[in-house]
Image (spheres, rainbow, N blue to C red):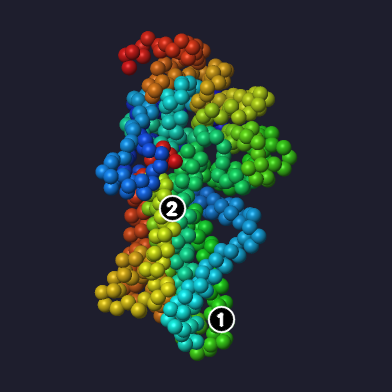
Amino acid sequence: MPEELAIRIEDLSIRYKINVDHKRTLKNMVMRASLGESVRTRTVEAVKHLSLDVKHGSVLGIVGANGAGKSTLMRSIAGILPPTEGRIIVNGKVSTLLALGVGFNPALSGRDNIILGGLASGMTRDEIEDKTDEIAAFADLPDGFIDMPVRTYSSGMYGRVAFSVAVSMKPDILLLDEALSAGDASFKEKSFNKMRELCAEARTIIIVSHALATITDLCDTALWLHKGNMLSNGKPDAIVEEYLKFLNVGTLPSNYEDM
Amino acid sequence: MPENPTFAPKIQVFEPHRASLPPLIPYLKEFWSRRAFAIELSRFADKAEYLDSKFGKVWLVLNPLLLAMIYFLLVTVIRGGAAKTQGLTTLAHILIGLFTFYFAQTCISAGAGSITAGGRLILNQAFPRTLLPFSSTISAFFQFLPTIPVYIAVIVIGKFFYPKTQIPGFTWNYLWIPLIIACVGITGFGLSLIFATMNVYFRDTNKLLAYATRIWLYASPVLWLPEMLHGWHRWVLYINPLGPVLATTSNVWIKGHGPTSAELIGMILWALISILAGGYFFISRERDFAVRI
């Protein structure tokens, strides 16, 4: 892989099976087997034949309607979901904020949760402990809240801590899925600044957001996913404009027919 | 291009592998490098669980102790009473057997729920998922440890009242104990990997496990002595993953003997089978967990 690339995705497809029935239990399986029924499953084609290169220091925004495969794509880059076909090559330390919250255990304090999150992502305890106060300060936690159980946090506080943890890990590649919706206007400004700072250090960021202004403000390239296909890829303003047209009028770009 | 001050090239390649193992050496390296996470997770999980409980960790010891008393009463009543010295032996056998069995049972039941309980963590971060059941095994070990002094205290008091009992004082055969504990822990961890995987696919596994472990307890040499089985019945002991190790437990703690060679081979084999089978079953499916949580 060329050195300037942070991520290379080669012909990636991701499919997985989901059970149609709500309750996946042994009891139901035995009942069904005794009645001679088979398990009803559906195959979801979340990402279809996607190829993409992301350079170090770039900010990529991903837009798309619900079910477009955005979160699946992010998880596969993080190494959480395996590709069904194709290959993903990632160069650098990845930090993720995919499911909202650092949350392990609401009964534990913010500090304990931060330590666990850091250890899970491969940091040492000393590294994290040095950072917890910085994280608390960045998240604008009121005095003493860092040592209170997470269940006492407001949802805004919760989201801000999660964001602070993700950015403070000094990642080479930062994956954010709808992470910026948590804070208020002033925190949003602060988080934008933090992300610009990370980019200035040649760190790579991928953002999934329904807030299109975030994409146009922060990103230098954008990508539109629709039902697992990459429809277009280019300057954020142009992509957002196309996407908005689709949202308002329901027309897909002309080249979609070829896919 | 600006320079990234902390950049260290770390190439990771993600490729398809379904129902087969990922490259094992990098996997085990990742596991080892994040062992601190498993240890802290077990510490924090215990802290969260006993934060509100007044007796806290005392319950962990009290629970199996009281249960042992109940089983002891049951067993002696069924037998129609026992000679006094025999009574202490029976009590000691049930106590240490139950404590050891509980160690394995806690590994398995806590480990089985660890994946489904770790939902958000699994959706958010990539790390070897075996760390979650491993953390439950660590918790189970630290819950088991304080039961040993309780056992010793009961025996010391018992010997004071019934000095003729067969239960030995110190013997060199106690050196088998670390191996026994290791075998129970490894077997428990291995089996917890199987049930944790099953619990992802069938959410009632953990509930059924509660009944299964009870039956398993009755089928194990805890409430009865291993030497009560004769002839082909002894197979009951060896087809049970905890059979040989519990027989050894009784041999070492109660009689002061070492394990027989059949017991020794049996317990080591079961530990190996459990960890290899459980490891294969779990690791080959763990990347599927994120879509099933």
Instruction: Look at mark 1 in the image and give the residue it sits on.
Output: B156
Residue type, mark 1 in image: Val
Q: Residue at x 65, y 36 (%)?
A: A154
Q: Residue at x 73, y 40 (%)?
A: A143
Residue B54 falls left or right of residue A224: right
* Residue placed furthest toward the right: A143
The foreground one among A191 and B223 is: B223
Rendered location of residue B138, percent (x, y): 50, 58
Residue A46 at least partly seen: yes
Residue A238 at least partly seen: no
Residue type, mark 2 in image: Asn
The dot on residue A191 is none
Estimate how packed mark 1 is, as few (under 14), some (14 to 19) or many (20 or more) residues with alpha carbons within 10 Å. Answer: some
The dot on residue B206 is 2
Q: Chain of mark 1?
A: B
Rendered location of residue B170, percent (x, y): 50, 81
The answer to whether the residues at label 1 and label 2 have Cβ atoms under 8 Å apart is no
For the C terminus of chain B, the quadrant is top left
Estimate how packed mark 2 is, as few (under 14), some (14 to 19) or many (20 or more) residues with alpha carbons within 10 Å. Answer: many
Against A215, residue B230 (above or below) is below
